[in-house]
Image: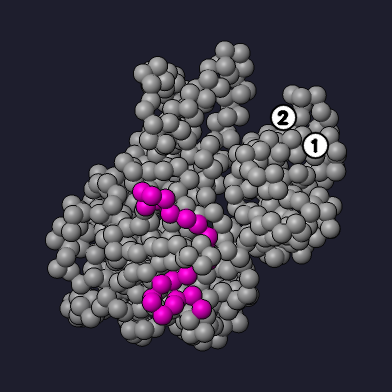
């Protein structure tokens, strides 16, 4: 094993708790896990983390949890999420994570389908959201609340997290070997978790992942990326998602100090306080940061705006050449250094000032934005994975190609189907199958053991994979031409006027887009250009001058595509697409079938019926 931080781990059982507990013991960092409570950062040392995991596991055992029992968690990011996760796995039990944004009916379905024996709930806010689902599932034996003040008085199943820990501590005094005995029984092929894919259609499917599935990714990522024990990370993406969950195990095993962030609203403050060196994120975060920076730069006025525009262009030229492996002229190099000192240094401070690299996943990041961040000295390594196969590939700091998802990690085989361009994956990272659903499992894992991802793409001569779109998302115009909507949407979101965009036109004459504007930026732009910005959002959406202004950007930003793929017209919407309205999954993927049905008349209007 070449990962320096994991030397000596080869002799450990290849399980999640063995790797994580050994790392906490070995490094015993004073800030192994941290979170903010009442405006103060509270740290847990490696030793304290091990003790809490032990007490929680013993408390669960005292409540009757046995190997194979399914235990669910619904909570925001916080130390208790990961402590509970590792405690569950230490008992050979199975963690069933639930998104805090999951629809109530889906929460009920997951609890019932998985046969969850107990449920951990964070606090009052989550309880209010999920209470109807929880009360309807009679087989739940215990409800355990992280926040003591959230415990409902009228439910005799409910206890506090602190009570659970005390039960565990008492059991430890009676039998000090009980925890280690259970831990020694955990095996690599034990089921570790059932993660229900949110899905854009139908009921969620429970993905069964073993300890080996995760540890394969932990070792492979550790070998591929330069992770240091001195690194600090900020956990922003939900731990209920495969991406952040896998990354947590990777960082944990490598001795990285992990800071928890409960919501995106806290990111700006936490970045400046934590000053992370490595961090995972999704394209939407980079899009928002980029647009804020551009807005501020444009608003400066005079020579400052001219300098900002100059730096942006120099950055694009510089990194475009670097990305194409072309030689960069001495003049351009000098200009880039000047731009970096005068303009891009402020970008770096905006993300904490210490970032060595971001890892981005979940959706494509446009080439323009990627170039801008790389040129600013903020490497964004795009990667790829999915619930059914953990984390499979990524760009490396010294071998990155903008627009690609990188090269496969060691031990993971990827190829592109000759039949239809679908990306296939084979390796020890691939799931055992869908829980209680062998028919769906057989549809996605072929006789050779390859998992069919549903993503269409290609691989270049240097082994970098590129995704063009989801197989089921491709739509055909009435002229027979196929359109990849994600590519169109990625370009549209380069416009500072656009907050959300969905490319539409299936079965129609031309491509259009449903656009939710960035209202603050749009109104400011309208005023600057002498266009009336009076009226409510609904009224502005109907204003032809406003529509034309957004449409102008849409046409401009999709100009690089083939003529039939370009957006011809847009339809403005006053409010963002949301999970609550059934338009998005908990992982913020658009439910295109719902959108097509809900906005059928609008789509006919802009795309031609």
Describe the element under mark 1 as helix, strand or loop.
helix
Identity of the residue drawn at 41% across and 43% down: 401
Image location (x, y in percent) of residue 118:
45, 79
Disc ID at residue 524: 2
Image location (x, y in percent) of residue 601:
84, 58
Q: Give the label, 1 or 2, closer to the camera.
A: 1
* Figure quadrant of residue 49: bottom left
Answer with left or right where residue 55 lies relative to residue 94.
left
Q: Is residue 27 above or below residue 348?
A: below
Q: In what quadrant of the picture does the N terminus appear?
A: bottom left
Disc ID at residue 15: none
Any magenta on residue 345? no
Name the residue beneath numbered marker 1. Answer: 548
Identity of the residue drawn at 80% across and 24% down: 530
Describe the element under mark 2 as helix, strand or loop.
helix
Identity of the residue drawn at 51% across and 72% down: 196
Q: Counting other residues with Cα less than 10 Å from the Cα at mark 2, is it few (<14), some (14-19), or many (20 or more)?
A: some
Depth check: give the residue in front, 129 or 426: 426
Q: Is residue 490 above or below residue 603?
A: above
Depth check: give the residue in front, 381 or 129: 381
Q: In what quadrant of the picture does the C terminus appear?
A: bottom right
Any magenta on residue 444? yes
Image location (x, y in percent) of residue 98:
51, 69
* Figure quadrant of residue 506: bottom right
Residue stretch in magenta: 443-464
* Figure quadrant of residue 10: bottom left
Answer with left or right where residue 419 lies relative to residue 526.
left
Q: Is residue 110 above or below residue 349?
A: below
């Amino acid at each position: 094993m070449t990962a320096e931080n994991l030397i000596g781990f080869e002799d450990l059982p290849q399980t999640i708790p063995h790797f994580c507990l050994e790392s906490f013991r070995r490094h015993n960092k004073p800030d192994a896990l941290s979170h903010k409570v009442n405006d103060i950062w509270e740290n847990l040392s490696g030793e304290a983390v091990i003790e809490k995991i032990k007490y929680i596991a013993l408390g669960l055992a005292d409540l009757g949890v046995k190997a194979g029992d399914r235990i669910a968690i619904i909570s925001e990011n916080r130390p208790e999420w990961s402590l509970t996760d590792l405690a569950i796995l230490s008992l050979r039990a199975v963690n069933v994570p639930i998104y805090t944004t999951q629809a109530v009916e889906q929460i009920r379905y997951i609890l019932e389908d998985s046969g969850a024996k107990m449920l951990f709930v964070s606090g009052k806010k989550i309880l209010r959201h999920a209470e109807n689902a929880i009360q309807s599932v009679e087989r739940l034996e215990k409800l355990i609340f992280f926040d003591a003040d959230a415990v409902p008085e009228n439910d005799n199943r409910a206890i506090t997290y602190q009570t659970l820990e005390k039960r565990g501590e008492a059991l430890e005094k009676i039998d000090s070997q009980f925890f280690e005995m259970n831990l020694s029984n955990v095996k690599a092929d034990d089921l570790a978790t059932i993660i229900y894919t949110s899905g854009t259609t139908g009921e969620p499917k429970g993905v069964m992942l073993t300890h080996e599935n995760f540890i394969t990714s932990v070792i492979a990522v550790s070998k591929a990326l330069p992770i240091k024990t001195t690194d600090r990370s900020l956990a922003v993406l939900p731990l209920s998602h495969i991406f952040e969950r896998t990354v947590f195990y990777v960082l944990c095993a490598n001795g990285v100090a992990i800071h928890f962030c409960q919501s995106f609203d806290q990111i700006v403050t936490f970045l400046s306080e934590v000053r992370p060196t490595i961090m995972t994120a999704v394209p939407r975060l980079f899009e928002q940061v980029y647009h804020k920076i551009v807005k501020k730069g444009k608003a400066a006025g005079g020579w400052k705006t001219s300098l900002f525009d100059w730096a942006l262009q120099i950055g694009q030229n510089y990194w475009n050449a670097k990305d194409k492996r072309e030689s960069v002229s001495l003049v351009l190099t000098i200009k880039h250094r000047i731009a970096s000192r005068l303009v891009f240094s402020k970008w770096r401070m905006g993300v904490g000032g210490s970032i060595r690299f971001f890892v981005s996943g979940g959706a494509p990041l446009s080439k323009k934005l990627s170039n801008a961040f790389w040129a600013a000295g903020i490497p964004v390594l795009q990667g790829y994975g999915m619930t059914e196969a953990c984390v499979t590939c990524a760009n490396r700091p010294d071998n990155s190609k903008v627009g690609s998802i990188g090269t496969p990690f060691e031990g993971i085989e990827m190829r592109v189907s000759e039949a239809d361009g679908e990306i296939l994956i084979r390796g020890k990272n691939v799931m055992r199958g869908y829980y209680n659903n062998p028919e769906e499992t057989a549809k996605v894992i072929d006789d050779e053991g390859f998992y069919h991802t549903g993503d269409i793409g290609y691989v270049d001569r240097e082994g970098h994979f590129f995704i063009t779109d989801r197989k089921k998302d491709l739509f055909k115009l009435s002229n027979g031409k196929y359109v990849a909507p994600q590519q169109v949407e990625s370009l549209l979101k380069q416009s500072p006027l656009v907050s959300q965009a969905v490319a539409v036109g299936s079965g129609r004459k031309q491509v259009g887009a449903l656009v939710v504007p960035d209202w603050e930026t749009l109104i400011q732009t309208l005023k600057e250009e002498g266009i009336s910005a009076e009226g409510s959002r609904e009224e502005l959406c109907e204003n032809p001058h406003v529509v034309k202004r957004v449409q102008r950007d849409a046409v401009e930003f999709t100009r690089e595509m083939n003529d039939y793929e370009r957006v011809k017209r847009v339809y403005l919407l006053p409010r963002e697409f949301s999970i609550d309205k059934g338009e998005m999954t908990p992982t913020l993927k658009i439910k295109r079938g719902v959108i097509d049905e809900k906005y059928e008349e609008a789509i006919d209007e802009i795309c031609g019926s």
